Image (cartoon, helix red, strand yellow):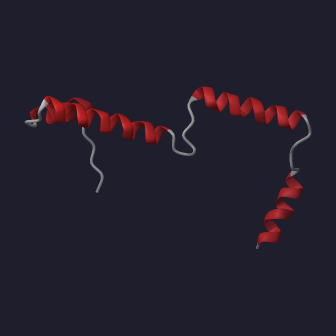
Amino acid sequence: MKTTISRDALFDFLQSLKLSAENKAWLGEKLIESAHEEASMPGQMDVREAKEWLKASELRFDNGEYVSEEAMEEYYDSLR
């Protein structure tokens, strides 16, 4: 079951825990590490990366590197 909590409530909860400064720093590092891992997961692009990908794709298209709709349909039909 998924639940949601506001950022402020989450922070207040974490602050209510009796953690040492060392444990707070460790927790902070772990949260940052986790966020970086999620951000680098496949399919997770920022706007800059998406624009670069689109520009490269358009360049390949302009250079004739594409597959026609008919060829793609034939390919997928062959997989059935």
In the rendered image, residue 21, in percent from the top left (x then y), is placed at 15, 29
Left or right: residue 23 versus residue 56 is: left
Extreme residue toward the right, this view: 64
Q: Residue at x 91, y 35 (%)?
A: 63
The part of the image, by quadrant, that contains residue 5 is top left
Q: Position of residue 58 (x, y in %)?
A: 80, 33
Q: Is residue 74 above or below residue 22?
A: below
Residue at 83%, 60% in the rendered image = 73
Vertical comparison of 43 with 19: above or below: below
Please identify the residue farthest to the top as the structure is shown.
Answer: 48
Between 26 and 66, the one nearer to me in the picture: 26
Residue 41 is situated, as x and y percent measured from the top left of the image, at 51, 44
Residue drawn at point x = 89 percent, y = 33 percent: 62
Residue 22 is drawn in which quadrant? top left
Q: Is residue 6 visible?
A: no
On-image quarter of the C terminus: bottom right
Does residue 38 appear in this view? yes
Q: Quadrant of residue 46?
A: top right
In the rendered structure, the answer to whether residue 3 lies left or right of residue 17 reads: right
How many marks the image carries: the answer is 0
Return the residue found at the far bottom: 80
Residue 30 or 39: which is nearer the viewer?
Answer: 30
Q: Quadrant of the N terminus?
A: bottom left
Residue placed most toward the observer, 50 or 25: 25
Percent x, y of residue 48: 61, 26
The residue drawn where x is 85% and y is 52% is 69
